[in-house]
């Protein structure tokens, strides 16, 4: 639903009650928080959880939800095998809401198992596909889907970058290299669908197992496809290895673009130095590389406040994961739960499906509008915002697209495959 004057008053704390009745008294609203806090995805998982915690702290400081504070029950979930026990722990405590999970391989089983227990699952950052049965009923994703990231990457190459490079779209021959799991397939399928939709020459897809990575063999398979555009859906270590081998083999590419979990991360540029320059990534924004003027005024103020508080608390800018966690949790705690008839999973899900906030309403540039159950993208936030990053110098990246949220412009002088 669109913001009403009543909602604005609630947000400002000027009335004592909202749509939520006082049932439950002043007891805390227990929310499970499932994130990888250790292992290879630990740093990103910690960032995302920090963003969620900051949003909960803000709402609690403003009186909570109808006088009830939010209490996060944090559980370290390094991988998918830890999900069943985590959900069991929460069920034994009668926790009815779960936020998570940074990792797509964690998100899918978490959404399924939580919904089977009657819990509402709220995905704050992972982009991989959720199972269709709970999606839009008791499972929602606020971040952009992997399919959307893949689509935006190909659309950017064809309609923005190719003209700057003097390339006709018909001359683009696109190959896709993707990790063979729920994350890689979701992103890669989105890219492949956009290649077909735009009528671009399709060189083919190369799948690989990240647990048995043979970068030279993968790059040789890519070379056999003779692409001049390479889209890569990878994790950080394999993304670095593939890019390094691509440069070493002098693969004749015009464009090399990746996505979240690799090409967008600071570690990608730190490891590759000059070899990263001229590559692109389709992903979520972070607080330091987002043009705040593209946000609604209240979202601008919230971003400024959150960025400063996060830096003071954690000693760093809000990464893409942190800003996604903060924005997604803020949407749940401030926009959705106060509009629910009761603080029960089905009532909160119904409130989520009524949301209609335009792009720029959340501090990461997203709006809030979920596809309903039964839709192809059920439970996905179709108003989520993604951006295009470019590595413009060794160790230095910038958001260059779309203009509404990009503080920099595409530097075509450094683009090389």
Image (cartoon, helix red, strand yellow):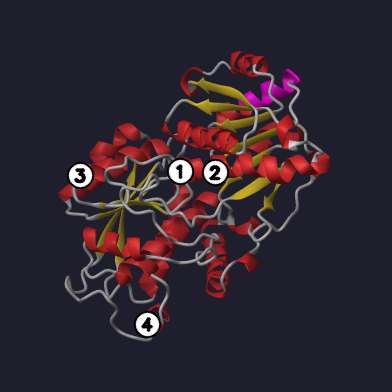
In the image, 30 versus 175, the foreground residue is 175
- Residue ID for mark 4: 6
Q: Quadrant of residue 390?
A: top right
- Of helix, strand and loop, which one carries label 3? helix
- Sequence-wise first label, 1 or 3: 3
Q: Residue at x 51, y 67 (%)?
A: 361
Apparent side of residue 23 relative to residue 278 in the rendered image (left or right): left
User: How would you rate the neighbour count of disc 4 (Cα within 10 Å): few for under 14, some for 14-19, many for 20 or more?
Assistant: few
User: How would you rate the neighbour count of disc 3 (Cα within 10 Å): few for under 14, some for 14-19, many for 20 or more?
Assistant: few
Apparent side of residue 266 relative to residue 149 in the rendered image (left or right): right
Which of labels 3 and 2 is toward the front?
A: 2
What is the CA distance from the residue labelled 3 to the residue labelled 2? 29 Å
- Sequence-wise first label, 4 or 3: 4
Please provide percent x and percent y for residue 408: 74, 55
- Sequence-wise first label, 2 or 1: 1
- Residue ID for mark 1: 127
- Sequence-wise first label, 3 or 2: 3
- Residue ID for mark 2: 149
Magenta span of residues: 241-250
- Residue ID for mark 3: 116
């Amino acid at each position: 639903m669109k913001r009403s004057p009543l909602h604005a008053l609630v947000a400002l704390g000027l009335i004592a009650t909202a749509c939520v009745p006082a049932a439950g008294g002043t007891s805390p609203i227990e929310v499970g928080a499932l994130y990888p806090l250790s292992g290879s995805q630990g740093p990103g998982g910690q960032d995302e959880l920090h963003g969620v915690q900051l949003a909960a702290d803000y709402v609690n400081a403003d009186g909570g939800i109808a006088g009830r504070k939010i209490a996060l029950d944090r559980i370290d979930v390094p991988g998918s095998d830890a999900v069943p026990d985590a959900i069991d722990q929460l069920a034994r405590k009668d926790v009815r809401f779960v936020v998570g999970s940074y990792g797509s391989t964690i998100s899918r089983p978490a959404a399924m198992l939580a919904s089977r227990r009657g819990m509402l699952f709220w995905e704050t950052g992972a982009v991989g596909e959720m199972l269709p049965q709970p999606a839009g009923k008791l499972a929602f994703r606020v971040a952009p889907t992997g399919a959307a990231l893949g689509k935006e990457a190909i659309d950017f190459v064809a309609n923005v970058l190719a003209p700057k490079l003097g390339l006709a779209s018909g001359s683009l021959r696109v190959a896709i290299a993707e990790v063979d799991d729920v994350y890689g397939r979701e992103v890669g399928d989105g890219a492949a669908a956009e290649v077909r939709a735009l009528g671009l020459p399709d060189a083919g897809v190369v799948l690989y197992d990240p647990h048995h990575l043979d970068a030279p063999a993968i790059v040789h398979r890519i070379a056999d496809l003779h692409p001049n555009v390479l889209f890569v859906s990878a994790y950080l270590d394999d993304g670095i290895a593939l890019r390094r081998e691509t440069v070493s083999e002098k693969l004749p590419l015009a464009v090399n673009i990746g996505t979240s979990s690799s090409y967008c991360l600071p570690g990608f540029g730190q490891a590759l130095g000059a070899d990263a320059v001229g590559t692109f990534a389709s992903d979520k924004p972070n607080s330091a590389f987002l043009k705040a003027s593209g946000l609604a005024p209240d979202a601008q103020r919230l971003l400024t406040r959150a960025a400063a508080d996060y830096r003071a608390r954690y000693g760093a800018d809000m990464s893409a994961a942190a800003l996604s966690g903060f924005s997604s949790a803020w949407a749940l705690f401030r926009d959705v739960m106060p509009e629910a008839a009761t603080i029960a999973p089905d009532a909160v899900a119904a409130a989520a499906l009524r949301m209609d906030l335009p792009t720029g309403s959340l501090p990461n540039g997203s709006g809030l509008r979920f596809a309903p159950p039964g839709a192809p993208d059920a439970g996905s936030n179709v108003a989520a915002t993604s951006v295009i990053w470019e590595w413009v110098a060794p160790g230095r990246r910038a958001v260059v697209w779309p203009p509404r949220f990009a503080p920099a412009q595409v530097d075509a002088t450094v683009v090389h495959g």
